Amino acid sequence: MTHNIDTEVLVVGAGLLGSSTAMHLASMGARSVDIVDLDLEGIFSSSELNAGGVRATWASPINAQLSRVSIDYYEKIAAEIGFRQKGYFWMYSKEAWPNAHALLKENKDLDSLRIEYLSPAEVTQRFSFLDKTDDLGGATFSPKDGLLNANLLKNHFRNRARENHARFHNRVWIHRAEVSTDQTIELCAWVWPEAMNPDEIKRILTIEQSAGECPRGAKAVKLRAQKIVNCSGAWAKRFAQSMGMRSVSQAVRRQVSVFECKEVDLTSYGMFVDASGVYFHPEANYILAGYAVPEEPEGYNFDYEGESFFEQYIWAPLFNRSTKFEALKHVTGWAGLYEVSPDRNGIVGRVAGFENVFEAHSFSGRGAMQSYGAGLGLAELIVKGKYRTLDLSAMSGSRFESGNTLTEGMLI
């Protein structure tokens, strides 16, 4: 983009949430929809650096409903997005099992999912390599859940949006925005050439930018919009601050390891979640595993700690679950960012105090599985003035001021 933009709806952030929102806005007849992102290809996007899990097994009804609406859509385009419904197999400690079992049983939105509840002995019967189960209280298997290719899903959303004349703009970084007296939103942005190396993109994303002088190599442009949507993921807080708003969410690093295990073939399975919090699934001829370190500080950190992370947080818990996981070979890994709200649930809706400012972010860990439904709901609110398919009002960011936060017990 080398010119100014004047549009009806400007979506900031083109990850899964932003691209889904754009697709729905364009299909519902928004007059003009423009989407801006510094990293349109997603080198550092949470949408690209995730594990690709999709599940409807949530304790909270709203999370289950969002995922169900999304899964219903993904089933229709399964071949296009690599959606494989091989299930989620979730193991619980003796201490955690009674509460988890009760939460799932109480959620009526899960009644049609045919969830199986397994004893520790049945765990090994189902998956013979899981042969250390003395600490388990039970497990669940949800056959409609599974894995997808998040990049293919994101491109599906974008292609459908473009078919309805939405426009995506790369290398755009908004550093200041304000709502004028006539409710028009005026934004100041910097635009860089398409040819940027990853180190330069990373520097812009990780270092606080001054709103003053235009950085070297960039061009200053003006953007105007009647409505704006903050879908900037791990950078949602920064964008909110550029508009003089407070954000309660934080960017937090998550690391993922890829390893080789010649004793176990997972290629025909879906996602496994161990009682330790380690999750793992097949990744081509290898296994991908991740873990959320509880004491991880907030911040824009993309450094992967390599074998030290793998050995401490991945290998040890997996060996405690299976004798087959004794001989593992670390192959590679990466770090990405989660955008985490105080109650660890997504934020979607109109921003309190503004009629024409909206947001959809903090879905980290569930962007792939809920992006379709969240984008649909938000587009309905923007275009039609109210939620129709799903009532997402409980997910408004104003809940943190009112104290009506959400509770979700099924978190990794």
Image: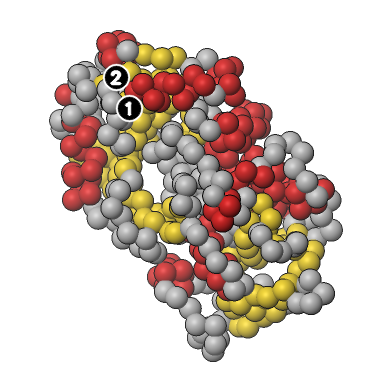
Q: Where is residue 126? Give x, y as percent.
A: 34, 13
- Report x, y in % for residue 154: 59, 47
Q: Who's the residue at 34% across and 35% down the image?
A: 279
Where does the image place residue 349, in percent across and percent down from the top left? 66, 52
Quadrant the C terminus occupies: top left
Q: In the visual, does 46 lie left or right of 184?
A: left
Asked if residue 95 is positioned above or below residue 288 in the image, the reply reads: above
Q: Residue at x 76, y 69 (%)?
A: 225
Going by the numbered disc 2, the residue's amino acid type is Gly
Q: How many numbered circles does the render carry?
A: 2
CA separation in Å, label 1 and label 2: 8 Å
Q: Residue at x 75, y 77 (%)?
A: 180
Which of the two residues, 142 or 390, is positioned nearer the viewer here?
390
Instruction: Give the mark, 1 or 2, whose residue is nearer the N terminus.
Output: 1
> In the shown orientation, is residue 178 left or right of residue 16?
right
Q: Which mark is residue 137?
A: 2
Circle 1 Cα neighbour tier, 10 Å, few/some/many (<14 / 14–19 / ≥20): some
- Which quarter of the figure is the N terminus placed in? bottom right
Residue appearing at x 38%, y 64% in the figure: 299
Q: Secondary structure at mark 1?
A: loop
Q: Give the x, y percent position of residue 334.
A: 34, 52
| Amino acid type, callout 1 | Ala
Q: Residues within 10 Å of mark 2 (few under 14, many from 20)?
A: many
- Residue tagged 1: 96
Mark 1–mark 2 CB contact (< 8 Å): yes
